[in-house]
């Protein structure tokens, strides 16, 4: 049962990462897409304008990456906590799971 929970967790994290980067075209999917570079081939920019747009896009991309990281940490934390409760009830290393969770998320 605990392995199924962790497997589901990994599949969920994988789907979030694929939506952000899209393994098919590299541009991500809709609002989940995370792009660090923004190019518009229809517009000619000065170097300063280009640099400012890229700086703004990098800042936005960093915010998106931090949000993705927070989601992943929350999903993994919840899955590990449930898994540890299951293992702990079965007489297995429940105490070790709690120590692991405290160390991993601090």
Image (spheres, grey):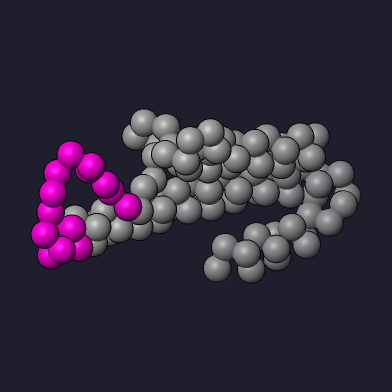
Q: Is residue 61 visible?
A: no
Above-or-below relation of 96 to 23:
below
Left or right position of 54 against 95: left
Left or right position of 46 against 41: left
Is the stretch drawn in magenta largely helix, strand or loop? Answer: loop
Q: Is residue 73 visible?
A: yes
Above-or-below relation of 15 to 73:
above
What x and y, as percent, mark residue 48? 13, 65
Task: Place residue 32 in its image quadrant.
Answer: top left
Q: Quadrant of the N terminus?
A: top right
Considering depth in this image, is 74 or 72 the residue closer to the camera?
72
Residue at 32% x, 52% y is 37
Residue at 77% x, 60% y is 95
What x and y, as percent, mark residue 62? 35, 57
Span of residues in magenta:
37-51
Task: Place residue 10 in its image quadrant.
Answer: top right
What x and y, as percent, mark residue 86? 77, 42
Above-or-below relation of 99 to 79:
below
Residue at 28% x, 48% y is 38
Residue at 13% x, 49% y is 44
Left or right position of 76 against 87: left
Task: Place residue 29 in its image quadrant.
Answer: top left
Residue 48 on the magenta span: yes
Considering depth in this image, is 21 or 97 the residue closer to the camera?
21
Q: Residue furthest top?
A: 30
């Amino acid at each position: 049962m605990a392995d199924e929970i962790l497997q589901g967790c990994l599949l969920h994290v994988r789907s979030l990462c694929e939506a952000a980067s899209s393994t098919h075209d590299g541009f991500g999917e809709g609002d989940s897409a995370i792009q660090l570079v923004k190019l518009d081939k229809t517009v000619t920019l000065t170097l300063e304008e280009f640099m400012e747009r890229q700086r703004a896009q990098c800042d936005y991309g960093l915010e998106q990456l931090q949000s993705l990281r927070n989601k992943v940490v929350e999903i993994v934390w919840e899955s590990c906590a449930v898994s540890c409760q299951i293992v702990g009830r079965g007489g297995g290393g429940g105490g070790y799971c709690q120590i692991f969770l405290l160390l991993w998320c601090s």
